[in-house]
């Protein structure tokens, strides 16, 4: 167990809330970074942890001063990143890249030697290319240019380019500062439950991140989905990975995906275990995709973590999203944003992706 203090950005987010839980479980103290509007709510929510959780306010990730927030800190975990729909597309690039650099620069200047960063599998591949070369490795990078992403008007595309730029900038910085132990974890889409004390703004589906992916399976029989090649990982495993990352020496770019399952298997499992949901289940189109396009072997070995079985991820994620659906319905909150999340079109478009394994 450790009593070390870890600075955590994005503590109010879907993933950040899980990282906080994991840090506390492993005996760390946490200083979470938030914007002013969320500070009081989070302080109230985490008051039960006493001195083990401190909420600090930094107005601007890009230009903010972290001097006070970094005092006494032994490691930084950076999860904060603007999502499409919550920021203008042109702003996502600067906030993601310069925000990451700003906090890491200041951390190193303050003597912090361990930084863990959540990237994305989108930083490894070209989502505009219908042919995905696999398996991807830690040497692969998303080749899409900033201007191409912005001109497309596609929020997901801009997000992946922003995360690519941020991660590349961090690795360049790490090369210039060999005293820094940088770990970047590039996961596939997250699924799973909400963390304890995770606060969701009523009706704000964007705050749920990719946890709503499992909700797609309940979009109705008139919808046909196709197994996505990038697939999924349990959000709790991502949290475990980035926490383990602050204990690793040297630089590591690690790829992380969960236990592979076909979406047809998921729908059959839901129908068998939750027959009351059968009328809501989608159709699943045919696919020959039977394995993930990235290999988590190195990440699991370096970090010493294990993966959550996919059925547990699916069960826990469904329980959480159905509870939220019930709560919003009872409160008269419009469910349209929840039902019309952007991951459904991605799943429908997934049929166009052709996977070519090079091994």
Image (cartoon, rainbow, N blue to C red):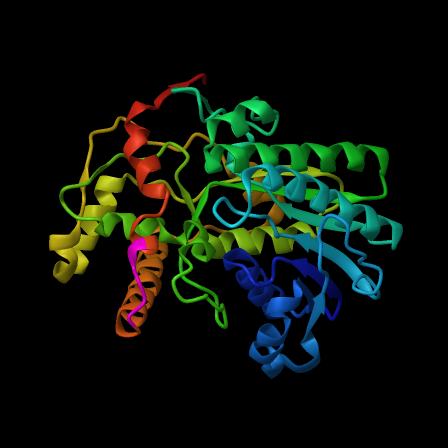
Is-magenta flag for residue 19? no
Q: Quadrant of the C terminus?
A: top left
Q: In the image, which residues are magenta?
A: 332-336
Residue, x 81% and y 52% (percent of image)? 107
* Closest to the observer, 338 or 255: 338
Q: Position of residue 54 (x, y in %)?
A: 70, 73
Q: Position of residue 89 (x, y in %)?
A: 55, 38
Q: Quadrant of the N terminus?
A: bottom right
Residue, x 35% and y 64% (percent of image)? 320
Q: Position of residue 115 (x, y in %)?
A: 73, 49
Is-magenta flag for residue 334? yes
Decide: is 331 above or below 288.
below
239 on left or right of 99: left
321 on left or right of 157: left
Which image quarter: residue 123?
top right
Kindly tell me whether residue 26 is visible in this rendering: no
Decide: is 159 above or below 303.
above
* Closest to the observer, 281 or 234: 281
71 on left or right of 10: right
Decide: is 229 above or below 8.
above
Overall secondary structure of the magenta section: loop
Kindly tell me whether residue 19 is visible in this rendering: yes
98 on left or right of 306: right
Residue, x 81% and y 44% (percent of image)? 180
Q: Position of residue 314 (x, y in %)?
A: 32, 54
* Closest to the observer, 315 or 334: 334
Which image quarter: residue 201?
bottom left
Q: Count up the numbered dots.
A: 0
């Amino acid at each position: 167990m450790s009593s070390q203090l870890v600075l955590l950005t994005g503590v109010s987010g879907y993933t950040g809330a899980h990282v906080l839980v994991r840090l506390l479980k492993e005996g760390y103290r946490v200083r979470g970074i938030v914007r002013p509007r969320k500070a009081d709510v989070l302080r109230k929510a985490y008051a039960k942890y006493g001195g083990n959780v401190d909420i600090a306010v930094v107005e601007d990730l890009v230009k903010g001063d972290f001097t006070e927030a970094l005092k006494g800190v032994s490691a930084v975990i950076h999860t904060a990143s603007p999502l499409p729909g919550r920021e203008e597309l042109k702003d996502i690039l600067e906030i993601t890249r310069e925000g990451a650099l700003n906090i890491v620069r200041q951390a190193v200047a303050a003597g912090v030697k361990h930084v863990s960063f959540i990237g994305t599998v989108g930083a490894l591949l070209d989502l505009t290319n219908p042919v995905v070369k696999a398996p991807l490795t830690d040497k692969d990078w998303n080749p899409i240019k900033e201007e191409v992403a912005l001109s497309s008007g596609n929020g997901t595309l801009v997000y992946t380019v922003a995360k690519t730029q941020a991660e590349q900038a961090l690795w360049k910085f790490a090369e210039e500062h060999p005293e820094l132990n940088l770990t970047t974890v590039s996961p596939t889409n997250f699924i799973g439950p909400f963390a304890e004390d995770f606060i969701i703004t009523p009706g704000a589906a964007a705050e749920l991140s990719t946890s709503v992916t499992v909700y797609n399976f309940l979009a109705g029989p008139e919808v046909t989905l196709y197994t996505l090649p990038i697939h999924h990982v349990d959000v709790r495993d991502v949290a475990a990975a980035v926490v383990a990352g602050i204990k690793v020496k040297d630089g590591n770019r690690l790829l992380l995906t969960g236990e592979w399952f076909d979406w047809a298997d998921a729908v059959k499992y839901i129908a068998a275990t939750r027959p009351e949901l059968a009328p809501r289940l989608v159709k699943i189109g045919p696919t020959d995709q039977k394995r993930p396009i990235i290999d988590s072997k190195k990440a699991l070995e370096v970090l010493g973590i294990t993966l959550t079985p996919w059925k547990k991820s699916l069960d826990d994620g469904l329980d959480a999203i159905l509870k939220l659906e019930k709560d919003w319905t009872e409160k008269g909150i419009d469910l349209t944003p929840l039902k019309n999340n952007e991951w459904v079109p991605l799943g429908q478009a997934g049929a166009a992706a052709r996977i070519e394994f090079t091994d």
